[in-house]
Amino acid sequence: MDPSRAFVKNAKRVIIKVGTAVVTRANGGLALGRLGSLCEQVKELMSFGLEVILVTSGAVGIGRQRLRYQRLINSSFVDLQKPQVELDGKPCAAVGQSGLMALYDSLFSQLDVASSQLLVTDNEFKDPEFRRQLNDTVTSLLELRVVPIFNENDAVSTRKAPYEDATGIFWDNDSLAALLALELRADILILLSDVDGLYSGPPSDPCSKLIHTYIKEKHDETITFGDKSRVGRGGMTAKVKAACHAADAGIPVVITSGFAADGALRVLQGERLGTLFHKDAHLWFSVKERSARKMAVNARDASRRLQVLSSSDRRKILLDVADALEANEEIIRKENESDVCIAKETRTAEALVSRLTLKPGKISGLAKSVRVLADMNDPIGEVLERTELADGLILEKTASPLGVLLIIFESRPDALVQIASLAIRSGNGLLLKGGKEAAQSNAILHKIITEALPKSVGSELIGLVNSRDEIPDLLKLDDVIDLVIPRGSNKLVLEIKESTKIPVLGHSDGVCHVYVDKAADLDMAKRIILDAKTDYPAACNAMETLLVHEAVMKTGGLAKLILALQTAGVRLYGGLKAADTLKLPKASSFHHEYSSMACTVEIVKDVLGAIDHIHEHGSAHTDCIITEDRDVAEVFLHQVDSAAVFHNASTRFCDGARFGLGAEVGISTSRIHARGPVGVEGLLTTRWLLRGNGQVVNGDHGVKFTHKELPVDCRKKASRMLEAANGAVDALSSGTLEGFSNGNNLKTG
C-alpha cells in the first residue's frame, strides 16, 4: 500500500461518481462493458463491508441519442432537408433517465444487489428539512444493503440551461458528488473519468505528466487543462474544482480512469492510482519535494561555478581532495569498520561485506587515482571538431558537462570517491545515494570531499541523499537532473527506468563469460580463469560462467581447468551438458551473478555456440575468449555484442582505472552514448560554437558554403580562451576592463 493512500483502510462510506464519457461510448451508445464492470466492483466492495453510493451522469447523452432516432423516423423527406436544431437538454434528460436507471437495475439484479434512484435539483439543497430527510433516506437504504444512485434532475431543473450554467450550490454531477460527500459524511470520493487522472497538461501531449498527488500551492499555476469532455459539462476543470472543494472540507478525493476494469477497487486497496486530493497533502510532500529540488538546483548552480574556473584551479581542487583523503585516513577507517561491524551483526551477505570493506592501502590508492585524474588533460571546452562553413564563418564542436548527475550505487564506499572526483573533473553537479550498509563511510567521505571544495564553488556541488524515500522525488526532476546512473542489480535499473523521464545509464548484472577455445594455450587459460574468478569474486567484472569447447573436454584439458578452480576453493555448477558429463550440481540459471567463489561451467560445440550462449544468457558486460587461433578470436571479438570483449586477457581488466580513465562512475551495459567503464568522457556532451563576422543566411543566398575541415589544436587553445574569458568576467565584476579593452586576449586566432 502506498503510504500516502494508507487512509483508505479506514474508509467505510464511499461515493463513486461516474462521468458521461465512462457511461457512454464515443458514438453516444451505452458502454455496457464498463457499466457491468462498475457494478461488479460495487458488489465486491459491499462484500468487504463498505457502504457504496453512486452518482451517475449519462442521462442527457442517452436521451439525446434516443430522441435523435425518434426525430429521424418521424420526419418527412422535406423535414430532413431543413437545418437540424440541436435537441434541448431537458427532454433529453427526461427520456434518458429512465433508460439509464433501467440498465443499472438490470445489471445490479444479475449480481443480487438492489439499487435505488434519487433525483435531486440545486434548489432543494437550500431547504434544511430536505437535507435532513436526504440523510435519513440514504442511511436507511445503506442499512438495507441497497445502492443509492444519484443524478441531477436536469429535466426539471430551475436553471435555464443546467448543462451550461455553472452557478448555484452545485452545477454538475461532479460538484453534486462533492456536495453529497459532505452532506452524507463520506470517507472518500472517487471521480471516474476517461483519463488516468489529472495531468500537468492535456493528456494527449507526450510532455504532460500524471500528477499523483495534487498540491494546490504547487500545481495551480502549472497545470494546463485541455478541451472539456466530449460529452460532459466541465471536463477535468470541473472535476478538479469539485475535488478541491471536498478535499478542503476533509473528504479525500481520487480522480482516476473509469475505463480500467478494477479502478475503484484498486483505489480502495491503497494503490497509487490516479490523482489524490487531500487536505494534508502539502504537509506530506511539499517539504520533501522542495528539499529534493533545492538539492538538485544547488548542485546545478555549483557546477556552473565550477565550469568557469580555470583548468589549473579545477586541477587543484582534485589535488586538495586527494590530500584530504590521506590526511583523514584514520577517521575514514574507523567509520568504515563501524559499518562492517553492523553488516556482520545483521548477517549481511559475505559478498556485500567484501564490497563494503575498505582494506589497508585502499585510501592511499583512491588518493592516487584522484591525482591521476587531476593530471589528465582537462576535457571541458575541448574542441573536438573544427569546420569552416564559409569564408570567415568557423564552427567548433566542443566538449561540455552534462549538468547534474544522480548516481545510485551499491555498498562500496570507494565508489563515492571515484564518482565525486569524476564529477569534479567533468564539471558536473552530483547527487549521490549510496547503500545503507555504508552509511557512516559515505557520510565521512562526503564530508571530507565537500570540505575540500573552494567556497567559490560551494559544497552543494556534491549532494548526499540520505534516504531511499527521497529518490522518487528526485526522479521527477527531469528539468534539473540530466542523467541517472543506477549501479546495482538489473531489478534496480529496471525500476529506475520505469520511474523517471530522465535518461538512465544502466549498469545491471555482471554475468561475465570466459570461453576456452580448442586452440587455447591451457596454461594461459588456467591463469586467466583463476584471475577472472578469484582475484575479486564480488566484482561485477568477475567471471561467472566458464564456457569450454567440447574438444578441450575430450583431450582432458577441461578436467585440469576444473581441478585448478576447485583447488582454489571455487564451487562449480554445471550447465545442461556439463552437469551430466562432469557430475556437477545443476546451475539454477545461466543468467546468474554469483558475486562469490562460485561459477557455472558449460560445454559448447564451437566459438559460434559460445557466442550464441553469451547472447542468450549474458548481460552484455565483459566476455573473453582464450585461443591461439587469431581468426577465431576475430570472430568472437566482432560478433559478441557486449560492452567489453577481450582476447587472451582476464575480464578483471574491465575497469576505469585499468583502462587509463583515472576512475569510473560505473560500467554501462546500456546501448547509449557510453558503454563499458564510464570515465570523464562518458559524463560529457557537446556544444557548438559558431564565430562569424556578420554573415546572414538570406535563404541560403547570403553565404557561399565551403564546409572545409580545419585542423584542431584544441586543448591549449580552449584552455587559453576559457581563462581569458574568465579574466574578462572577473574584470567586469570588479568594474574594470583593463587588459581586455582591445579584445586581443579573446581572439580565436
Image (cartoon, rainbow, N blue to C red):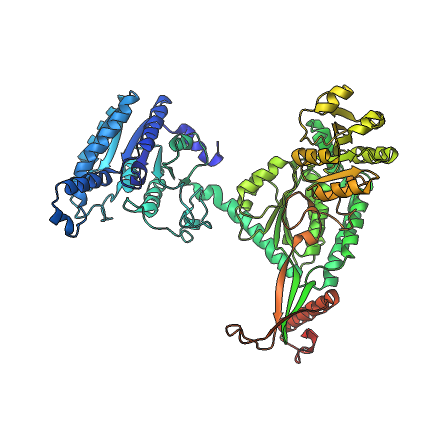
Seen as rendered, the residue at the extreme right is: 523
Residue at 64% from the left image edge and 44% from the top image edge: 670
Spot occupied by residue 640 in the image (x, y as percentages of width and height): 70, 41
Q: Nearer the viewer, residue 586 or 556?
A: 556
**Does residue 458 appear anywhere in the picture?**
yes
Give the left or right position of residue 266, taking residue 523 as reference: left
Seen as rendered, the residue at the extreme bottom is: 742
Give the left or right position of residue 427, taking residue 105 as reference: right
Q: Nearer the viewer, residue 297 or 47?
A: 47
**Does residue 123 appear anywhere in the picture?**
no
Residue at 50% from the left image edge and 72% from the top image edge: 699
Spot occupied by residue 481 in the image (x, y as percentages of width and height): 57, 51
In the image, residue 591 above or below residue 81: above
Spot occupied by residue 251 in the image (x, y as percentages of width and height): 35, 37
In the image, residue 724 above or below residue 495: below
Give the left or right position of residue 373, taking residue 202 as reference: right
- Residue 210 is drawn in which quadrant? top left
Figure quadrant of the C terminus: bottom right
Q: Nearer the viewer, residue 375 or 569?
A: 569
Q: How many marks?
A: 0
In the image, residue 265 above or below residue 255: above
Give the left or right position of residue 121, taking residue 456 as reference: left
Residue at 43% from the left image edge and 37% from the top image edge: 273
Spot occupied by residue 49 in the image (x, y as percentages of width and height): 36, 22
